[in-house]
Amino acid sequence: MEFAGGCHCGNLRVHLRLTLPPTEAALRSCRCSFCRAHATRTVSDPHGMFEVWADDWSDVEPYRFGTRTADYLVCRRCGVYIGAVGETPAGLRAVVNTNSLVGRDAFTQAPARPDHDGEETPARLARRAANWTPAVLHR
Ligand SMILES: [Zn+2]
C-alpha cells in the first residue's frame, strides 16, 4: 500500500509504504501533551518505508522534547506535523502522522492510547527499532 502526503503549504512531501491495508493498520494517539495538542493518529510498520522531501529544509522544525531522542518534524510555514524520526540500533526509524496523508480517511482503526512516560532511553530505542518504520530523509 502506497500513500502520498505532506504538510499543508507543500514544503514537506512524504511517501509511505505499508504492508497492511489502512483499514487494518494499528493507529496510536499517544498521551503526551505534544500528540494531544496535534490530535495525532500515528502509524508505523517495521516492514514499510517512509520517505520525506522538503523544498526548503530550513523551514522544517526538528522539534525535540522529553528524552530528545526523536525529531518531531513540523513545517515552520504551515504548522503541520508529519511524523517523528529518530536514530535507533536498527537505523533511522519513523512514526507517521496519518493526518498528513492524502488517504487519511482510509485509516479507520480506533487509536490505541499508549503512555511511554518513564520509559528508559535504551528500552525506548529498542522499541522504536522493533516497531517504527524504516525512514529516509532526502535532504
Ligand atoms: Zn507546510
Image (spheres, helix red, strand yellow):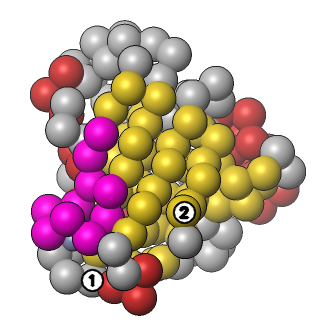
Q: Residue at x 56, y 61 (%)?
A: 137
Q: Is residue 113 visible?
A: no
The residue under label 1 is 76
Q: Nearer the viewer, mark 1 or mark 2?
A: 2
Element on which disc 2 rests: strand
The image shows residue 131, relative to residue 106, as above or below, that is below
Q: Is residue 67 magenta?
A: no
Q: Secondary structure at mark 1?
A: loop
What residue sits 48% from the left and 77% below the top? 62
Looking at mark 1, is its residue's CB closer than 8 Å to ligand 1? yes
Segment colored magenta = 4-13
Q: Quadrant of ligand 1?
A: bottom left
For residue 42, which quarter of the picture?
A: top left
Q: Amino acid at mark 1?
A: Arg
**Tag 2: amino acid:** His
Distance Cα–Cα, label 1 vs label 2: 18 Å
Q: Is mark 2 within 8 Å of ligand 1?
A: no
Q: Nearer the viewer, residue 102 or 113?
A: 102
Residue found at x 27% / y 54%:
6
Number of residues whose C-alpha sits closer than 10 Å to that of mark 2, classed few (under 14), some (14–19) or many (20 or more): few
On residue 138, the disc is: 2
